[in-house]
Image: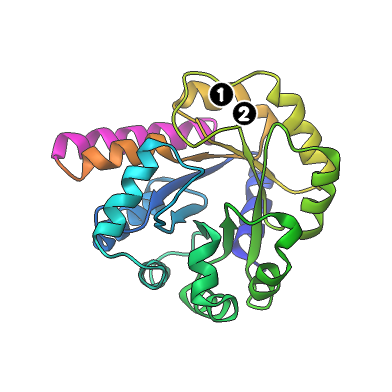
């Protein structure tokens, strides 16, 4: 069984929510990426999301854009991302999702990517800018190698689009809290609770909330409406400081642990 599917079944049985931390691979270098995902694994992550650096990250806000710029300056490629997952997989069994834009996957070759990602130990792929209507080749390459394609849904996803997503999505649905780019937010609109409920029911997959998750109090507000939380920009911002000083590293670890506890209802 795919590790992502297995993890959500376990979490449901334990009545816990998935904590899904995100890091941009190669920020500031690929060696530090391993340090980050090792910390994630040992600090309470249920699934780890690793971002593939890209030169035009149109769905990302300033924090992750800067992280991608640093990663590209360090020379990080998709092959490097797979290698760091391979190294991680030698010691840890936690599910890993690769998150990226379609162009690097396409340039790598979908069939080759599917095989190499499987060999590295990847469990799922979220292609940010791949419409579900055009996702069959990617889905085929992933399914052939035991991986699941993860898709986004938003507050404006209509019934027609939901039906299309349902045909291709597996593993879980990543619900984007607001229309716009990634980044920490002071608050999220209450009305998305009903939309999340509708999408969970209509698609029938675990649904996690991301984009703008900035602290434990936000997790508490939406705890009963989702199956997990993706924490991206809030971690990446602190990771930038963590790589510069011990004080920053301490703040990063404290924030990470607080978010893990909130997701696990502690």
Numbered mark located on residue 223 in the image: 2
Query: Residue at coordinates 64% horizontally, 43% vertically from top-left?
Result: 14
Q: Is mark 1 on a helix, strand or loop?
A: helix
Magenta range is: 245-266
The residue at which mark 1 appears reads as 220
Would you say residue 228 is visible in this rendering? yes
Would you say 60 lies left or right of 91 here? Answer: right
Q: Where is residue 74, by image quadrant?
A: bottom left
Crowding at mark 2 (Cα within 10 Å: few <14, some 14-19, many 20+): some
* Front in this rendered view, residue 9 or 167: 167
* 74 lies above or below 145: above
* Front in this rendered view, residue 220 or 202: 202
Would you say 201 lies left or right of 137 here? Answer: right
Query: Residue at coordinates 63% horizontally, 46% vertically from top-left?
Result: 11
Would you say 115 lies left or right of 159 here? Answer: left
Where is residue 117 drawn, in percent x and y?
51, 73
Would you say residue 27 is visible in this rendering? no
Where is residue 194 drawn, in percent x and y?
76, 25
Q: Where is residue 118, by image quadrant?
A: bottom right
* 129 lies above or below 216: below
Query: Residue at coordinates 25% horizontally, 32% vertically from top-left?
Result: 251
Where is residue 121 drawn, in percent x and y?
49, 71
* 227 lies above or below 134: above
Q: Cβ–Cβ below 8 Å for labels 2 and 1?
A: yes
Name the quarter where the N terminus is drawn.
Answer: bottom right
Where is residue 72 drawn, in percent x and y?
30, 58
C-alpha distance separating marks 2 and 1: 5 Å
Q: How many marks?
A: 2
Which SS type dominates the magenta stretch?
helix
Query: Residue at coordinates 37% horizontally, 55% vertically from top-left?
Result: 37
Crowding at mark 1 (Cα within 10 Å: few <14, some 14-19, many 20+): few
């Amino acid at each position: 069984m795919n590790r992502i599917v297995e993890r959500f079944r376990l979490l449901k049985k334990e009545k816990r929510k998935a904590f899904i931390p995100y890091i941009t691979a190669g920020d500031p270098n690929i060696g530090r990426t391993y340090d980050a995902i090792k910390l994630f694994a040992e600090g309470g992550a249920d699934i780890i999301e690793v971002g593939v650096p890209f030169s035009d990250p149109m769905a990302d806000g300033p924090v992750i854009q800067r992280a991608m710029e640093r990663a590209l300056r360090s020379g990080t490629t998709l092959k490097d991302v797979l290698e760091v997952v391979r190294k991680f997989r030698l010691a840890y069994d936690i599910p890993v999702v690769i998150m990226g834009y379609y162009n690097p996957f396409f340039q790598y070759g979908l069939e080759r990517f599917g095989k190499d990602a499987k060999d590295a130990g990847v469990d799922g792929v979220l292609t940010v800018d791949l419409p579900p209507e055009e996702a069959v080749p990617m889905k085929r390459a992933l399914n052939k190698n035991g991986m699941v394609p993860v898709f986004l849904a938003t507050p404006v996803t209509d019934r027609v689009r939901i039906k299309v997503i349902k045909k291709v999505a597996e593993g879980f649905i990543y619900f984007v809290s607001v229309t716009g780019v990634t980044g920490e937010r002071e608050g999220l609109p209450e009305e998305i609770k009903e939309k999340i409920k509708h999408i969970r029911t209509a698609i029938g997959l675990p649904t996690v909330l991301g984009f703008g998750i900035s602290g434990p109090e936000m997790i508490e507000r939406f705890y009963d409406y989702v199956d997990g939380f993706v924490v991206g920009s809030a971690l990446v911002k602190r990771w930038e400081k963590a790589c510069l000083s011990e004080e920053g590293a301490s703040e990063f670890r404290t924030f990470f642990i607080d978010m893990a506890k909130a997701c696990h209802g502690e």
